[in-house]
Amino acid sequence: MNTHTFLKSTFLLCLVGIFTACGGTQKQSSTDESDSLNTHIIPKEQWLDTDGNPINAHGGGLLYHEGTYYWYGEYKVGKTYLPEWATWECYRTDVTGVSCYSSTDLLNWKFEGVVLKAVPDDENHDLHPSKVLERPKVVYNAKTKKFVMWAHVESADYSKAAAGVAISDTPNGEFTYLGSFRPNETMSRDQTVFVDDDGKAYQFSSSEHNQTMHINELADDYLKPTGRYVRRFVDQAREAPAVFKKDGKYYMLSSGCTGWDPNRAELAVADSIMGEWTVLGDPCRGVDADKTFYGQSTFVQPIAGKENAYVAMFDMWKKTDLADSRYIWLPIVVQNDTLTIPYMEKWNIEEVFGK
Ligand code: GAL
């Protein structure tokens, strides 16, 4: 490690200490009262968009495109209910669609609308309100110039275990739904899509009754799998995958499999995306780290224009009122070659990663 890296790491660690020690005073909103701009990320608080409405984008992911971040997520409105047949806590809201917000600073989010809408007049449609629509992720295909959304779609009884794909010419929609399938004829529930530097895309999905992660290589148009896939994390019941790349290595942040209830996060690394993955352990640090701070991973976003700067995004599910589920976004701190996610009650990109 050179002196610069050492000093930067030490600085970051000090910051972590300061932020962890001084918590507990922030109340209510992430809006600075002196003006209407949000200046900090405050995990677990209610986050408001630029219209003053609570941000509603759960199980989501970001896309950075031409200087703007787009945040897509499950648009959860209305009552949370448990279906009559439920033998487990499959709390849900009616499917209303996928929302999109845009921001240039990751702090102030403009509501772009519901970019993939529910289909209330066809009860057989994947997007009918009675079904389940989770974990939407959008990637940009530089070859076709299309924005491609993948999401977990379920039948009302949770037996479908499929991926739904939608497409748009613009990042803020509207997306056209193309249909659903089981990638490589295998079950697909919690999922994400990752685009590598060479333009190849991969879908990671909890398969085999959520017991084993499948890494499905996608065709050049990103609309379907090529047929090439690998089984990884076999019988390890990993969910909520969030994949990112750093210095040529691939990382997967994931949760265990306990429904809406929190559990311990895990970070794993691989030299090649479809190669062998090595489990590194729990990257979370601080109070309630063993329960991912009461969150569940959903995405990791590299910060544009900065090195070794990543935001880890988690959902803090409120299972009996899912629409009021909150967000926990935290920096990933890189020290030597170790990646940790320290809890911070209030932070922003410049304070943690520098201007
Ligand atoms: C979680 C999963 C969520 C949702 C939930 C339903 O394990 O990560 O996306 O499917 O189960 O209980």
Image (cartoon, rainbow, N blue to C red):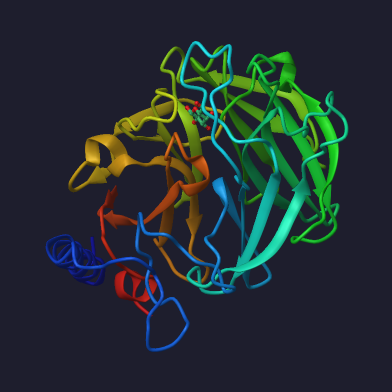
Where on the picture, by quarter, is residue 11?
bottom left
Quadrant showing the N terminus: bottom left
Work out which quarter of the rendered image holds the C terminus and state it.
Answer: bottom left
The location of residue 189, given as percent across then percent down, is: 60, 25
Q: Can residue 108 be seen in this view?
A: yes
Apparent side of residue 248 relative to residue 34 in the rendered image (left or right): right
- Residue 344 in percent (x, y) is at 26, 59
Q: Which residue is drawn at 84% across and 23% down?
A: 124
Q: Residue at x 25, y 72 (%)?
A: 4
Q: Looking at the picture, does residue 327 appear above or below residue 23? A: above
Residue 164 location (% of width, % of height): 75, 32
* Residue at 18% across, 62% down: 24
User: Closer to the camera, 4 or 294?
Assistant: 294
**Location of residue 160 (image quadrant):** top right
Residue 190: x and y in percent read 56, 30
Vertical placement of residue 6 versus 272, above or below:
below
Furthest-bottom residue in view? 34
> Image check: 22 left or right of 261?
left
| Image position of 346 (left or right of 314) | left
Q: Residue at x 46, y 25 (%)?
A: 276
On screen, residue 341 above or below 236: below
Q: Does residue 248 show up?
A: no
Q: Please tell me which residue lies in front, 122 or 351.
A: 122
Front one among 284 and 121: 121
Q: How many numbered marks does the figure carry?
A: 0
Closer-to-camera residue (161/215)? 161
Relative to 172, residue 219 above or below: above
